[in-house]
Amino acid sequence: MSLSISIILPTYNERQNLPILVERLEKVLVGRDFEVLVMDDNSPDETWLLARELSETRPWLRSIRRLANRGLSPAVIDGFKAAEGDILLVMDADLQHDENVIPKFIEAFENGAELVVGSRKVDGGGVENWSMVRRFVSWTATQMAHLVLPRTVTDPMSGFFAVRREFFQNISEEINPKGFKILLEIAARAKGRVIREVGFTFRGRIYGESKLSAKVMTQYLQALYELSFGKFIPLRFVKYGIVGASGVVVNLGGLKLGKELFALSSSQATAFGIEISVITNFVLNNSWTFRDAKLSGVRGLALGLASFHVVCLAGALINFAIATYLRNKGLSNDYFADLFGIVVATIWNYIVNTRATWRTRGS
Ligand code: GDD
Ligand code: MN
């Protein structure tokens, strides 16, 4: 039984590397049933055009120029969807991934594997001249990934892996394609699947530059959270809670400011502190917690701010009612009673703000 293989090459400004890689792939795969898909995000250096030219004499090569939804993971997912092989393999197009181990990938699939990961952490694997800092960052990220992944994946950040088409199609709708952590998304859903690893040496880059940025790392951390605790407590709620906590600080600061700078009475200063914190909470939630449903324009902001006020006021009443109720029921610790009220009010505020103020789909 021989399996056909589709090689997906995500590219962004890889004009110098692509022709070299295409030639090397042709040598490694000769005699097999294969295709190569270049998934280019409309690179300024016109990698997509070069790929198209290369494909003129190579029927197994396809160049896909993507104009929307830029990013490594979405490009890979699109490639997987457009590919026709039994095996869907992705590798970097910058010559850092060793094409010579691809036959080992295919062999693993022929022996029943459903996910095969090119790993720097097993026999035959390694990295070429990495600094201590980069090694440490990579090590930390790997340890964190083990919170959500089977231990059998020693290199969960690898961008060099392959999946059986049937397995991918099964989970493709669940995958959240953002940033660089595509393998993480797939491996987290590989329970009960046969996983194999193939060692390879991650080479240094010679031409062009890396696109791995701070934003990519943040997205990675978010994905880890969403795949673990996020099942119980949404990340958005955690952000909402952090903003809420910042509001307490602003509230107290406002009180001090009102008293000392504006010479307000104690109750006026308290009201001032509350109002200031409601406004800063609204601004922070709008630009961070609910960034994907951000309100803008005078009308949108005014309506949102009004709605946020109403919800917060109702929350305060709930908080007050619960604390009072618990005290009347004989709970002697005031702080405990209030804390309980705060927790319930926060959850209530969160749910209503999510539905009414920002109108997300409850996610
Ligand atoms: N289509 C598309 N869109 N391709 C992209 C994009 C994008 O937004 N960003 C990067 N690429 C392509 C690059 O052109 C390259 O072929 C490949 O994806 C990897 O990008 P690099 O920028 O070279 O990544 P890296 O070498 O820093 O990171 C590699 O190692 C990491 C682990 O250390 C990648 O393999 C990562 O996936 C991996 O996590
Ligand atoms: Mn690279």
Image (cartoon, rainbow, N blue to C red):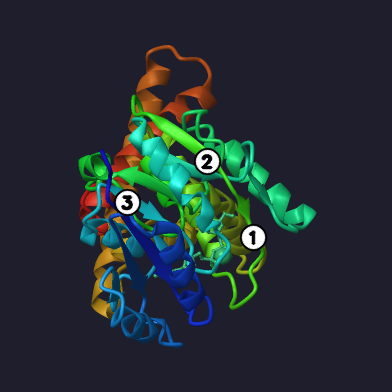
Residue at position x 37%, y 29% from top?
A: 194
What residue type is disc 1 on?
A: Arg
Residue 87 shown left or right of residue 281 in the figure: left
- Determine the residue located farthest toward the top in the rendered image: 330
Question: Helix, strand or loop at disc 1?
Answer: loop
Mark 1 and mark 2: Cα distance apart in space: 15 Å
What number is the disc on residue 198? 2
Q: Position of residue 177 (x, y in %)?
A: 34, 55
Which residue is pictured at 40% across the width and 27% down the height?
A: 323
* Inter-mark Cα distance, 3 to 2: 15 Å
Question: Residue 113's x, y, as percent?
Answer: 37, 33
Q: Nearer the viewer, residue 141 or 328?
A: 141
Question: Can the viewer see residue 213 in this picture?
Answer: no
* Residue at the spot of label 3: 88
* Coordinates of residue 350 in the picture (x, y in percent): 33, 45
- Residue 263 to residue 334: above or below: below
Judge the density around disc 1: few (<14), some (14-19), many (≥20) Cα neighbours within 10 Å.
Answer: some
Residue type, label 3 = Leu
- Screen quadrant of the N terminus: top left
